[in-house]
Amino acid sequence: MKLSHIILAAAALITLSSCANAPKTEEIKAGAERRMEFSSEDEFLDYIQYAHLNYMVEGAAPVSGLALERIHMDGNYPSNDADVITTGASGFGIAGLIVGIERGFIGREEGVAQLQKIVDYLAKADRYHGAWSHWIVDGTGKTKPFGMKDNGGDLVETAFLVQGLLCARQYFKDGNAKEQKLAQDIDTLWKEVEWNWYQKDGQDVLYWHWSPEYGWEMNFPVEGYNECLIMYILAASSPTYPIPAEAYHKGWARSGGIVSENTKYGLPLVLSHNGAQEYGGPLFWAHYSYFGLCPKGLKDQYADYWQLNVNHSLIDYNYCVENPKGYKGYGPDCWGLTASYTVDGYTAHMPSNDHGVITPTAALSCYPYTPAESHAALKHFYFDLGDKIWGKYGFYDAFSETADWCLPHYLGLDQLTIAPMIENHRTGLVWKLFMSCPEIQEGLKKLGFEYNGI
């Protein structure tokens, strides 16, 4: 449904309670209207991070403390899923909470309390051989089917969630008694995921789904390249239910078939992107596995993962600058194609599936890879377009200047990568936490990775 000239120029409202260990909070709280002046670029980035991670604080699901699948500020929920939480985005949101605590946006005790609430809820929610489902009903902990046969374990979404949980474990493991308990409870959840069950009778590949009602009927063996690298790394790293290295090399890497010789705009694609071999896939492929897993200095026999993600981001940027379809607004300061809402539904935007829709998270979550290009986009989105595309939890999910379209709608999967990925650009905090996990270091070695740190 079109909505011309969104009139919800909502305040950049962040009403988290201030606390003694949050000296920056008062500086970056929004007033009645979107702020237009900042004392420094650092304060501006603080403000942007805070607004988006607020989706996981003020916008968190009330019972679980986890991330809602969507928040529609106009109250229009055609899918009747306003109370549904999403496991994958919750992993991103957990990383965002750590950023908020570290930067003093939220109190440490407040953050620990929410994370303990989350962990207690996850321990009781529906699980399938240790894996959670894609969607969970907030009030009950029961699975809400993502599709008719997708009503069981979702190993990919579980991997995104566990990635965030392990970052929290590392952040709090040497803290006070409450924090150490939180870290231990996270460790228990991590060790209960039966990664090798999802090999489907010991095959050398991981399957995305399993349902107690439909078994393996979704029939989705996960081969690269797409957003799912972290699933294989976690599965290989598990201290309790590990997969063998052969599943990674034969399944994910397709016995070497994952490697690409293609280039675009003079940039090697590096790996063969499933269904998008010319330009690469949607940009969330450069975000979801890498908000914790650090691609900088990470290599194996198939790829240099920093080059992979930088080139993927720059190819998307160059495509939008070239703008072969002549869409209004595209250019050096307005770029970024990824999965999001679109004018008539939802789709995975990318150069080979371009509908004139820009999704702010695409450029903003690429900050570590393309800092100058991402910052130019941020300033344009905020200062030039913000009266139409900015609201309570930061930028709305997507917009099209060609169609004169934007809705005051948010998706957790898009909002919640922004704060941790900007933080990785600024300090590397989330990368350092995840890569400090001893199991992950062992798992990477097992799979043949080299990691030189950041």
Image: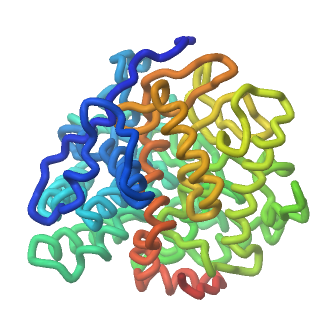
Residue 312 visible in the shown view: yes
| Quadrant in the rendering for residue 133 | top left
Which residue corresponds to the image point at 47% horizontal and 17% vertical from the top-left? 6
- Residue at 78% across, 63% down: 271
Image: 11 above or below 136: above
Q: Position of residue 171 (x, y in %)?
A: 29, 74
Q: Left or right: where does residue 331 sit relative to residue 188?
A: right
Q: Position of residue 287 (x, y in %)?
A: 56, 56
Q: Residue at x 22, y 74 (%)?
A: 184
Residue 315 percent across, percent down from the top left: 78, 53
Picture quarter with the C terminus: bottom right
Determine whether, in the image, residue 32 is placed left or right of residue 286. left
Residue 409's place in the image compared with 228, above or below, is: above
**Which color scheme did the rendering employ for the protein?**
rainbow
Measuring from the top left, give residue 433's x and y in whole percent. 39, 75
Residue in the image at 76% along x and 41% along y: 320
